[in-house]
Image (cartoon, rainbow, N blue to C red):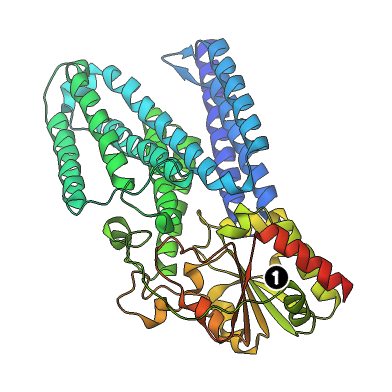
Amino acid sequence: MNDVMHFSTGLSILEISYILASVLFILGLKMLSHPLTARRGNSLAAVGMVLAIAATLLFHEKDGEPIGNIGWVLAAMAIGTAIGWVIARRVKMTDMPQLVSFFNGMGGAAAALISLMEFPHVSGELIMKSGMSNGHVLAILLGLVIGTVSWAGSMIAFGKLDGRIGDLRVKAMKYVNLSILAAIIIFIIYIMTRDVAASSELTHLVIILFFVSVVYGVLFVIPIGGADMPVVISLLNSFTGVAAAMGGFLYQNQAMLTGGILVGSAGTILTILMCRAMNRSLLNVIIGVFGGGGAAVTGVAGTVKEITVSDAAVLLSYSKKVVIVPGYGLAVAQAQHICHELDKMLEEKGVEVRYAIHPVAGRMPGHMNVLLAEADVPYEQLIESDEINADMPNTDVIVVIGANDVVNPAAEDDPSSPIYGMPIVRAREARNIIVMKRGMGKGYAAIENMLFFHDKTRMLFGDAKSTLQALVNEVKAL
């Protein structure tokens, strides 16, 4: 009787803990939608995760037996925590997209390992009743495939973002990928239609399915160009969430299930929003040519006009409205703090300064928001591109720092351009345009940017950080 009461009490505490953890996940995700509450939301979600892990270790029981090997579990957690802490402390802001891809891939790998470990232990009694065709087996197989694709794809995305892996574009690639995907589906159907006494007899097929999924994950991401990486990262993130949800279903773990569903749904919504930001379908992103496959404009496109730092400082200081368009070049130069110093100095002179944030600027969703938040730029100054475009004709100076494709007029003017139809920051509608770049290099879409040759455009060449510092010095001297 006492054992029954102990089991019931432990189970109740476990379930209540999972519910509380799920609530904290939801609240944390909601707070992440605004920069002013994002840090608190992240902390709440972390508390929820700690609660779920602690409750599982203390109260989870199977067949009346508590979890074993607690020492090994705690040791693994300690090692993982130490590694994660060191990486997070040392990573540069420019490497944040790579870090996101790496961490996301680890989540997918964990989900895949769960499936590989659980399949051989599927209950023989369950198989005798319904064969392999049951929800438990389906969750294992889907968790394996989706988690593996997420892991392999994220590792390729990491390599591409880090400059270690280039694009591999072959016309037949999409047909190869479709064939592999069809093979994966056939594998799953075949395994689930087998009527065997033990799942261990099909374990070799599950291992083959794992390796086929690895190949698909690699070939799925490797043709996609750099400009589409924000979409790919959010899509792979949703995959990891779905795979984690499959693990929650297997273990009847409500916290794991809720967390996986939240990550999967948030990643899916973000993927859709990113596609809309580029005015493209997800299918077009996956099999299209944008992001490195477009044909670059060759030959002389026009005359480039330069501006000195002194003249740029005078123009900015005596303006009423200034808009700054940040891009990946700003992140590479680690110039966000100097940029914020410049905008504060201009505001002291009575200039209204705002930042035009394009949804796909940078290499991951929200990259520019994170970059500028690190420099303590007030959230009220960050304006989405579609909102700020209406006021562009009233803008005295627009300063483009390290951005390229997101201000390229070809998106509106050239139907043959690979970025045609993508909403952009309409920089050319401002009264004066200053473009800060190292040189005349092209963006991820590998096409010429005609904005650089516009009559109102003046190029300010040089490293963003040193150039901005020189601007700050000049503005201070005025």
Left or right of 22 in this view: 133: left
Give the crowd class for mark 1: few <14, some 14-19, many >=20 residues within 10 Å: some
Dot 1 lies on which element?
Answer: helix
Left or right of 413 in this view: 77: right
Give residue 192's position: percent from left, percent from top. 16, 31
Badge count: 1
- Foreground of the two, 448 or 287: 448
Any part of residue 377 in sight: no
Above or below 37: residue 5: above
User: From the image, which quarter does the C terminus lie in?
Assistant: bottom right
Above or below 248: residue 384: below
- Foreground of the two, 380 or 443: 443
Mark 1 lies on residue? 381
- Foreground of the two, 290 or 256: 290
Above or below 280: residue 177: above
Which residue appears at 57% of the width and 27% of the height? Answer: 53
Q: Residue furthest right?
A: 477
Above or below 417: residue 203: above
- Foreground of the two, 148 or 284: 284
User: In which image quadrant can residue 14 be found?
Assistant: top right
Give residue 441's position: percent from left, percent from top. 49, 63
Which residue appears at 12% of the width and 32% of the height? Answer: 190
Left or right of 177 in this view: 69: right
Give residue 246's position: percent from left, percent from top. 36, 36
Which residue appears at 51% of the width and 18% of the height? Answer: 7
Any part of residue 331 in sight: yes
Residue type beneath disc 1: Gln
